[in-house]
Image: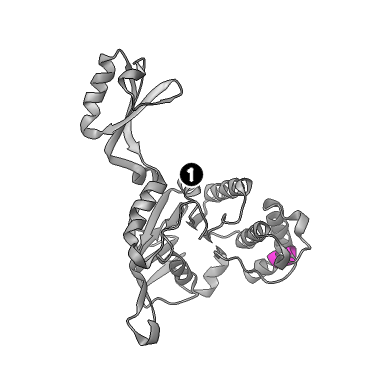
């Protein structure tokens, strides 16, 4: 955890006032997390876990009850730092202007001027395929087009850090693919992406690391591939053996794949050999991100809801 991390929360607690002065309701509980520069970081959790609260504290929209943090080496809420950040809220709400004027407005708020502002605005409108609606007021855009306009304003200032809350929730499959490619290009350019989403397939495809928040605390954090590897099961892929000897096996690309407890790994390999087969590879079994998410989210208890993965909040 270097001091030059793109985003860092240090023991952040946020409590909301209880009804009629009753016990405060915690949204974040001694929450700590570090997002390193140059990575795409997935931020997951069930409804009510505290994700949006954490994002709003990082952006300086609210203050923590206790704890602190830094964004691009400056304390949360540092006004000048916001010009180096691109932010997209879960519920996109833009100033009511024609799409081109709105994107220019947000670019100007972040310090862009003159030729640079014009060039960046046009590039973002083209990148997000908004050329046909540049003169239409954003209040009259479809949800998908409004989402694209929101992404355009988040990107117009060429930010070092992107903080995105459900950036693909209103997009069709083609739009989601385009945003995925856009974020991968941002990473290749050295930028950092902090991505909160329930689109688990997208998270699994592009994120270097993920954190799953449950009841205001990090329940699991780490590299995506490592978190999805099972410690208890192994996957044995083989060819040349009769499928009848392995009724539980799955046929893929003319090879059979079977998942077994690690304690049965050696016996399974010997069974393949005995059946005249050849073992192609043996790997730790890989679970789905959906399975991991549901398993951890079910710890949330009655105070939070576990939304079906893949749906927007």
> In the displayed structure, would residue 25 be above or below residue 204?
below
* Residue 186 horizontal side relative to residue 46, left or right: right
Query: Is residue 90 inside the magenta stretch?
Result: no
- Residue found 33% across the figure and 17% down from its top: 278
* Residue 271 horizontal side relative to residue 35, left or right: left
> In the displayed structure, would residue 157 be above or below residue 236?
below
Q: Main secondary structure of the magenta part?
A: helix
- Find the residue positioned furthest to the top: 276
- Find the residue positioned furthest to the bottom: 20
When asked about the image quadrant of residue 155, the answer is bottom right
Q: Residues within 10 Å of mark 1 (few under 14, many from 20)?
A: few
Residue 246: tell me if it is visible: yes
> In the displayed structure, would residue 168 be above or below residue 100?
above
- Residue found 32% across the figure and 23% down from its top: 246
- Magenta segment range? 99-103
Task: Indicate the quadrant containing the N terminus: top left, top right, bottom left or bottom right.
Answer: bottom left
When asked about the image quadrant of residue 64, the answer is bottom left
Q: Nearer the viewer, residue 11 or 232?
A: 232
Question: Whole-percent x and y of residue 87?
Answer: 56, 64
């Amino acid at each position: 955890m270097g001091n030059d991390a793109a985003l860092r929360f240090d023991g952040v607690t946020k409590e909301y006032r209880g009804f009629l002065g009753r016990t405060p309701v915690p949204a974040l509980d001694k929450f700590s997390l570090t997002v390193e520069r140059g990575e795409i970081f997935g931020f997951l959790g069930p409804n009510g876990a505290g994700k949006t609260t954490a994002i709003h504290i990082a952006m300086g929209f609210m203050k923590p009850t206790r704890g602190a943090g830094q964004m691009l080496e400056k304390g949360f809420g540092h006004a000048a730092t916001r010009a180096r950040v691109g932010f997209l809220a879960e519920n996109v709400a833009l100033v009511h202007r024609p799409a081109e004027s709105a994107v220019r407005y947000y670019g100007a708020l972040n310090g862009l001027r003159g030729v640079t502002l014009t060039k960046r605005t046009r590039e973002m409108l083209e990148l997000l395929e908004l050329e046909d609606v540049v003169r239409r007021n954003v209040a009259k855009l479809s949800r998908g087009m409004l989402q694209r306009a929101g992404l355009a304003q988040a990107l117009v200032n060429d930010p070092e850090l992107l903080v995105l809350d459900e950036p693909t929730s209103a997009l069709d499959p083609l739009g989601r693919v385009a945003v995925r490619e856009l974020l991968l290009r941002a990473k290749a350019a050295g930028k950092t992406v902090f991505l909160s989403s329930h689109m688990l397939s997208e998270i699994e495809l592009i994120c270097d690391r993920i954190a799953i928040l449950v009841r205001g605390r990090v329940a699991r954090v780490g590299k995506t591939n490592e978190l999805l590897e099972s410690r208890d099961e192994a996957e044995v892929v083989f060819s040349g053996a009769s499928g009848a000897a392995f009724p539980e096996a799955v046929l893929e690309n003319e090879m059979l794949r079977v998942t077994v407890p690690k304690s049965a790994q050696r016996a399974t390999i010997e069974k393949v050999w005995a059946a005249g087969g050849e073992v192609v590879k043996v790997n730790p079994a890989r679970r789905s991100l959906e399975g991991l998410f549901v398993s951890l989210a079910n710890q949330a208890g009655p105070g939070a809801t576990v939304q079906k993965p893949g749906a927007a909040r």
